[in-house]
Image: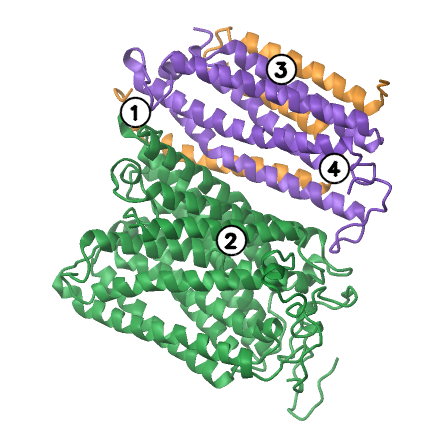
Chain colours: A purple, B orange, C green
Amino acid sequence: MADASVTLRPEPQFGDLGQQRATALSGMWLFLATEVLFFSGMLTAYFLYRAANPEGFAEAGRDTELWIGAVNTAVLLTSSEFMAIAVNRVEHCHPRLLARMLGATAALGLVFMGLKALEYWLDYRHHLVPGLDFVGKGAHAHAQELFWILYFCLTGVHALHLTVGITLVLIFAVKARRGVFSRSYGAPIEVLGLYWHFVDIVWVFLYPLIYLTGRSS
Amino acid sequence: MRFPINNEIVRTGWAWLALMLLLGATTGLAFVPLGRMQLATALLVSAAKSAIVLAVFMRLWRGPDLGRLFAAVGIGWFAIMLILTWADYLTRSGPPFAAGMS
Amino acid sequence: MSDATAAPERSYLTEGLTIRSWLLTRDHKRIALLYFATITLFFFIGGAAATLIRLNLVDPAGSLVSADTYNRLFTMHGVVMVWFFLIPSIPTTLGNFVLPLMLGARDLAFPRLNLLSWYLFIIGGAVTLYALAAGGLDTGWTFYTPFSTLYSNGHVVLAVAGIFLTGFSSILTGLNFIITIHTLRAPGMGWYRLPLFVWSLYATSAILVLATPVLAITLFLLAFERLVHVGIFDPKLGGDPLLFQHLFWFYSHPAVYIMILPGMGVVSELIAAFSKKPVFGYKFVAWSSMAIAAVGFLVWGHHMFVAGESVYAALVFSLLSFLVAVPSAIKVFNWTATLHKGSIAWDAPMLYALAFIGLFAMGGVTGLFLAALAIDVEVTDTYFVVAHFHYIMVGGMVAAYFGGLHYWWPKITGRLYPEYWARAAAILIFLGFNLTFFPQYVVGWLGMPRRYHAYPPEFQVWNVLSSAGASILALAYLMPIFYLGWSLLRGPRAGANPWGATGLEWQTSSPPPAENFATTPTVTRPPYDYPEPAAEPAALPRG
C-alpha cells in the first residue's frame, strides 16, 4: 500500500474516487452531528446547574487554572491551523510537508494533553476532585462540587476524543511519510481533519464555560 | 524546506490570527463585569470562533451539501434539547432551583 | 409465482465457506445473517424472562419468585427486548440485507463499518448478558436515579456498559444507512422512486444517529455517579433526579419510533405486494415517516407527567404527543386505501401486515389516551401502559418483523417456506397475542400497578387469562423455527421473484450473488408499478 504510483481504484460500491471522497466526507459530517448530541447532555446539565447556582459556579470557576486553559485553547487552535495546512498540502502533493504538518498537529495535541495532566494534578493537590477528597468552601460547597463533577466529565470526555485524534494523526503522519496519500487519495486526511477541528470547536465552547466563570467578581 | 503559499493557506493564516484575537478578547472580557450578559458574550465569541473554524478550516461552504445539512441538524437538535428541557425548569420552582439547596 | 428453479451456481452464500469468511465478511447480506442469529438468541432470552414473569403472575401472592428476583426479571426482559432485540431487529437484519438491493447498490457505503457495528453489538451484548447472568439488576430498563446510582444492589455499571457499547453499533448502522441512501442510489432512482421501506429506514436512521448519543452520555453520567458516589443527579448536592429522566427520555422516546418505523416500512411493502397495487398516497406515507421521526423528538416529557415536571411543560408535551399520532394515522388510512379494490393474496406476510394495522391502531389509540394528562395521572405505571406499548411493539413491530422475514425469506435463502404452517403460526400468534395483552388493558384500567410481583386477588382472573395467552404466544413463536428451518433443507427452490412484486431486490436471483447485480440497474419506472387491475379475471395484465 506504500507505492503512490499504483493506480488507485475506489471500493467496489463506489463509481469513482470522487464519489468515494464525497461520501467519506459526508459520513464524517454526520458523525460529527452525533458528537454534538453526545456533548449536548452534559452541556444542558451545565447550563441548568449554573443558572440554579450562580454563586457556587462562580466560586468554583475562579479555582480553575486560567493560564492552562488559555494556553491550551491557543495550542488547539494552532494545531487546527497546521491540520488545515496539511489538508491543503495533500491536495498539492507534498508528502514530506504533509507528514510534518500532521506531526506538528499531533505534537500540539500532546502539548495540550501534557498541560491537561498537569492541570488535573494541580486540581488534585487543591482538593478539587469529587469522589476523592473534594473540599468545597462556604455556603455553596455543594454547587461547587457539581461544577467540578461537570468539569471532569466534560474535559475528560473531550480528552478521550483528543487522544483518539492524536493517535490517528500520528498513524496518518507515518503513512504520509511513506507516500500513501496523494492528490487523488487525500480524502482520509481531510476526513480526519474534520474530526480534529470538531474536537477543537468543542474546546472553544468549554473554555469560557470552565475557565471564564466568575472572573469578574 | 520551501513552503509554498496559496490562497487557501493565506486564508487559514488570517483565520488563525482572528482566532487568537478572539481568544484574547473573550479572556479579557471575562474580567469586565457584564452581569447577566457575561455568559451570553462569552458564548457569542465562542460561536464566532467556531464559525471561522467551520468556514475556513472545515470548508463547510465548499464541501458536500450534506455537510451543511448535517451540521445544521446537529445544532438544531441540541437546541431542541435545551428548549424543551428549559420549558420544564423555567416553569416550576423546586430543585434544582429551590432556595437553600446549595 | 415463477416456476421452480435450480439454485444459482454462485450466490453470496457460496462465496467462501469458512468461518473466517463469515466473521470477516464485508458483505451486507452476510452481516445481516450474523445479526439475525444474534437477535434471535436475544429474543428467546427476553422471552424466557417474560415466561417467568407471566408464570409468577398467575398467583396473586406472586410466590414463584421473590420480589427482588421479580424486579430483576422485568429489568432483564426490558433491557434485552428493547436494546438487543427490538431496536436492532428490522434495520440490522432485513434492512442490512435488502437496502442495498432496493437501491440497486453493490453494498452499503461503509461495509467495514457495518461489520464493526455487528462486533460492537455482540461485545455489548456479551457484557450485558454477563451482568444478567451474574445476578442482574433491579432498576427496571429505565434506570431511574437516585435508585440506580446510589441505592440499587445490582450490576448496574456492567449492564450499562454493555448497552453503551451496543449504542455505538446503532449509531454506526444509522450513519451507514443515511449515507448509503443519499449517495449510492442507482441511476434514475430519485427519492420518489424509492420503496417506502427505504424512506422508513432513513427516518429510523435519523433517530438512531441523533438520539443514541444522548443515551450514551446519560449512561456515562449514571455510571460515573454510581462508581464515584457523587454525581449530577444527586439531590444531596443540589442535583435533580428529573434531569436524568429528561436526558434518558430524550433518547428513549424517539427510541420507540426506532422500533416501530421499520415495521411500518415493511408493512407498506407487504400491503402493496399482496394487493398488487401501488401504495395509496405514496408521498404522504413517505413524509409521514420523516414527520414521525422529527416530532417524535418533541414529546419525551409525556413519560414524566407525574414525576415532578411542571404542569406547563406537561401541557406542551401532551399537545405535541397528540400531534405525533397524526402521521401514524395517515399511514393507517393510506394502507387501508391501498387494500381497497386490491387483488388480495392471503399469504402469511399479508396476514402479519393486516395484524399490524389492527393491533398498531389499537396500541396507538391508547397512546392518545395516555397523552391526555387527566387520564395519564390515573393509569400511569399501571398495566394499561404495559398493554399499550406491547400492542405496538409486539402486536405491531414483531408482527411486521415476522411478515418481512417471511416475505424476503425466498430472497435471502433461495427457498420457499411451507405456506400452510406459516399461516397457522401467524393466526396462532395473533390469537395468543390478544389473549395475552388485552386483559392487561382491563386490569390496568382497574388499577393493577406494573412492576409488582404480587397483586390484589380481584385481579387474578385477568392475569390468568394473560398468562394463558402467553403460553399460546410462546408456542406460536416457536413454530417458525421448525418450518423455516425445515425450508432450508427441504423447501422448494425460489425463483427471482416468487411473489411477483415490484422492486429492484426481485430483479436479481434468489439468493443474490455477492455483488448483488450483474450490472447496475437503471430505474425508469415509478415505485409499486403494478399493472392496473384487470376488469375481468381472464384479461391479460398490461405492462
Query: Is C469 on the left or on the right of C121, as rendered?
Result: left
Mark 3 element type: helix
On the image, the x and y values in percent for residue C46 come to 36, 60
Q: Which residue is mark 4?
A: B63
Q: What chain is tagged by disc 2?
A: C
Chain name for mark 4? B
Work out which quarter of the rendered image holds the N terminus of chain C and state it: bottom right
**Residue that mark 3 sits on:** A74
Q: CA distance from mark 2 to mark 3?
A: 43 Å
Q: Report whether mark 1 lies on the same chain as mark 2.
A: yes
Alpha carbon distance from label 3 to label 1: 34 Å
Q: Which circle, 3 or 1, is nearer the viewer?
A: 3
In the structure shown, which secondary structural element does the residue marked by tag 1 occupy?
helix
* Front of the two marks 1 and 2: 1
Identify which amino acid the numbered label 4 is placed on.
Answer: Gly
Q: Quadrant of residue C489?
A: bottom right
